[in-house]
Amino acid sequence: MTALLPCKECISGTIHKGQPLGTDTEMFGHSVYVSPVPERPKGTIVYITDIFGWTLPNARLLADAYAKEGGFKVIIPDFFPFLPISYSSIDAFAPLNDKTAPSFVTGLWQKMTTMPWIIWFLYRTRPSVSTKLIAKFLEELKNSEPDTPIFTVGFCWGGRFSLITATDNVKKGTVNAVASLHPSLLSVPSDIQNTIVPVSVGAGTKDNLISVPVMKNLEELYSKQGVECEIKIYQDRMHGFAVRDDIEKEDAAQAMEGAKKQVLDWFTKHL
């Protein structure tokens, strides 16, 4: 089992520059962001977010890249029953440098207001609630697009639930394959029992929530279930790197590009 509480990297990082090009709409009772849809999409990717939720610019920009570079329709649903943590607090716990660090008073206030919210977040988004919510969305999506391959990709909080969507918690035939980058709060082996679709998982060597030994254990457990599994380890990357690392740094940009390629290659393989 991985850690039971989020690490500081769960709620830190950088906000990426750029203008998302998709649209906000409603789908099956959820607010969703839909990236610009390719003329002939290969399939549909459901992006399950980290703790910052569906409005985080980084998530929308990455979804747009999946659509443009991979040829997929990409949807980011709002699966939270309340407003997500404000990304204005992103540097309160682990500022990247002196320029991004808030003042002492501001940082203290952000920490004091964020920690109770995290406890409330973990309760409101517990697996007994979120698994059913996400499964229902995916099954309704499949009913509306019966001939379209459907995939899920998740990051941090969403990484855990993306792996759960690969199990029989979701109706068989709904999802073609899943990808998970640095899943947090993953309970092993219970969260991955009865996995029925191919799984790709990526994490960094400096991840405090899912260590390299845990990743290797995942590979063994999936193998015992006869599940096609891909495990990728990213050198010197911390938790959250695939969506919230500093894209201005060459090594971080390369790792993020590698994670993006991992996802698109995996889904293209399982069309």
Image (cartoon, helix red, strand yellow):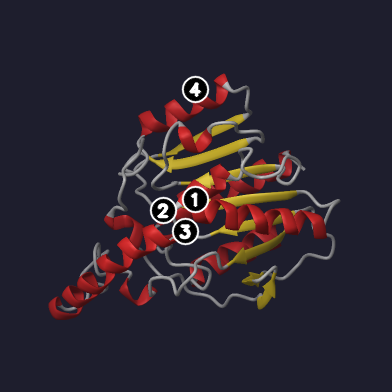
* Residue 108, image x, y percentages: 16, 74
In this view of the protein, which residue sits in the foreground, 37 or 175? Answer: 175
- Helix, strand or loop status at disc 2: helix
Q: What is the C-alpha distance between the residues marked 1 and 3?
A: 26 Å
Q: Nearer the viewer, mark 1 or mark 3?
A: 1
| Image quadrant where one finds the C terminus | top right
Label 1, label 2: how far apart the Cα atoms are: 28 Å
For image coordinates 37% across by 50% down, the residue present is: 239
Instruction: Give x and y (percent) for residue 29.
Output: 66, 71
Q: Which element is circle 1 on?
A: helix
Residue to which mark 2 is pinned: 241
Residue located at (61% from left, 38% from top): 167
Q: Quadrant of the N terminus?
A: top left
> What residue is disc 4 on?
220
Say the numbered circle drawn on residue 107.
none
Which of the two labelled residues, at mark 2 and mark 4, occupies the earlier sequence position? 4
- Residue 204 vs 150, above or below: the answer is above
Q: Which mark is residue 243?
A: 3
Mark 3 touches mark 2? (CB < 8 Å): yes
Residue to which mark 1 is pinned: 128
Residue 12 in sight in this render: no
Label 1: how many Cα within 10 Å (few below 14, some 14–19, many 20+): few
**Numbered disc 4: secondary structure:** helix
Marks 4 and 3 sit apart, C-alpha to C-alpha, by 27 Å
- Within 10 Å of disc 3 (Cα), the crowding (few <14, some 14-19, many 20+) is many
Q: CA distance from mark 3 to mark 2?
A: 6 Å
Label 2 CA crowd tier, 10 Å (few <14, some 14–19, many 20+): many
Q: Residue furthest front?
A: 128
Rendered position, 39 above or below 213: below
